[in-house]
Image (tube, rainbow, N blue to C red):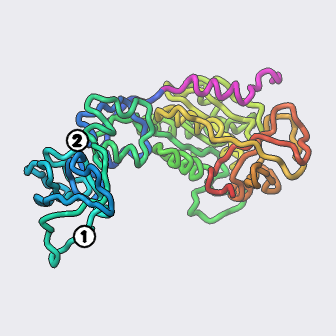
Amino acid sequence: MAEKEYLTVAEALELVLAGIEVLPPEHVELAQALGRILAQPIVARDSLPPFANSSMDGYALRAADLAGATPQSPVSLRVLGEIAAGAVGDVPVLPGTAVRIMTGAPLPPGADAVVPVEDTNEPWRDAERPLASHVLIFRQVAPGAYVRRVGEDIQTGQVVLAAGHLIRPQEIGVLASLGVSSVPVVRRPRVGVLATGDELIAVEEPLRPGKIRNSNGYTQAAQVAALGAVPVPLGIAPDSETAVRARLQAGLAAGVDLFISSAGVSVGAYDVVKTVLEKEGNVDFWRVRMRPGKPLAYGRYGSIPYLGLPGNPVSAMVSFERFARPAILKMAGHTRLERPQVQAIVQEEIYSDGRESYIRAVVRREGEVYTAVTTGAQGSHMMTSLIAANALLIVPEGVTHVPAGQSLSAMMINWPETVF
């Protein structure tokens, strides 16, 4: 095959994302909305706060009554009563009076300010110390002091969260405050995960000559789940068109939105996945100028997008990071599809074959700069090198030698927990 038929990483990613659509919305209970993407805007039906209330434990009063108040010349006010949070104060505050008030309690009629208890001579009381008939105030306050106004945070009719917004714990709190118990979110992608190859056996089986355990199926299912999507395990398919097709049909029956398989997309006599795709759907491309991960098929099985990853475990994981991860995130409604990247100064020489290369590395922050060291041998079968890594250093296409001291982009696959 001519070199022009190999796509760059950027070209391949553009084709993948062009074929991915955002999934339709569904309503979920508020407690299940964490990490989801809003499918529709949220409009406030209430104001927050819904009523004027105190931001401190203290005394609700008329600010005008405190003119000239100082620690040396306090103002004495008659105490009318007390308002706890959750209660309603019906007694109006008249000139020369005050009401003891707790944090969050509604401001009584006539009051326009609150003085904290620390600025009075009655900073506390309990069952043995009844509410005093009068209180001394040691300072002046302006109207509105320590009062949370109606709608100060959110006003009725306001668009609080736009469609496409990621729901985090803070959004959960706002939605709960607004009485939103059911949230319209983009549906979770269902991703069929298939491992292919005559050499594969189940993880619980004892090893025997020529066989290896199915690690890719578990790895890709975990990568899918880590994105908040739903992995649909399709098991192992031996190297036959009939077996692969049967597993994929099971995926269609399970309602998957995307297929991901490992192995079977290279040029070997037993690499049958590409053949199945060509007969039952289409293949948009199947080779990318990247290392690791040159054999990568993208197309459709029937109407469902299909990503065929390489068989070597590191190649499969890196290819998933580069192509499957952004595709799944786009399906789920996300707009930020890429891992964060930093510029890191490499501490050793790095050699490449001219393809865009992804080097397993440890990135550390040292003062104002980031530094990077590789995790050792970069064989595409060496999974432990990924366990040690928190980043993938990107060697650009056409570069075969990176001297120590040069800066490379580092795709942070653990951010920021392992950068120190």
Residue 353: give x, y in percent of width and height.
Answer: 87, 38
Residue 161 among those drawn in magenta:
no
Left or right, 327 with respect to 382, comes to: left
Q: Is residue 73 left or right of residue 202?
A: left
Q: Residue at x 90, y 48 (%)?
A: 404
Tag 2–tag 1 contact (CB < 8 Å): no
Left or right of 354 in this view: 208:
left
Residue that mark 1 sits on: 124
* Residue 355 locus on image (x, y percent): 82, 34
Task: Identify the amino acid type marked 2.
Answer: Pro
Q: Position of residue 386 (x, y in %)?
A: 70, 54
Figure quadrant of the C terminus: bottom right
Q: Residue at x 33, y 32 (%)?
A: 42
Q: Main secondary structure of the magenta part?
A: helix
Query: Residue 179 falls in which quadrant of the image?
Result: top left
Q: How many numbered marks appear?
A: 2
- Binning the other alpha carbons within 10 Å of mark 2 as few (below 14), some (14 to 19) or many (20 upward) gives some
Q: From the viewer's perspective, tell me whether residue 285 is left or right of residue 140.
A: right
Front label number (2 vs 1) = 1
> Which of the two discs, 2 and 1, labels the residue nearer the N terminus?
2
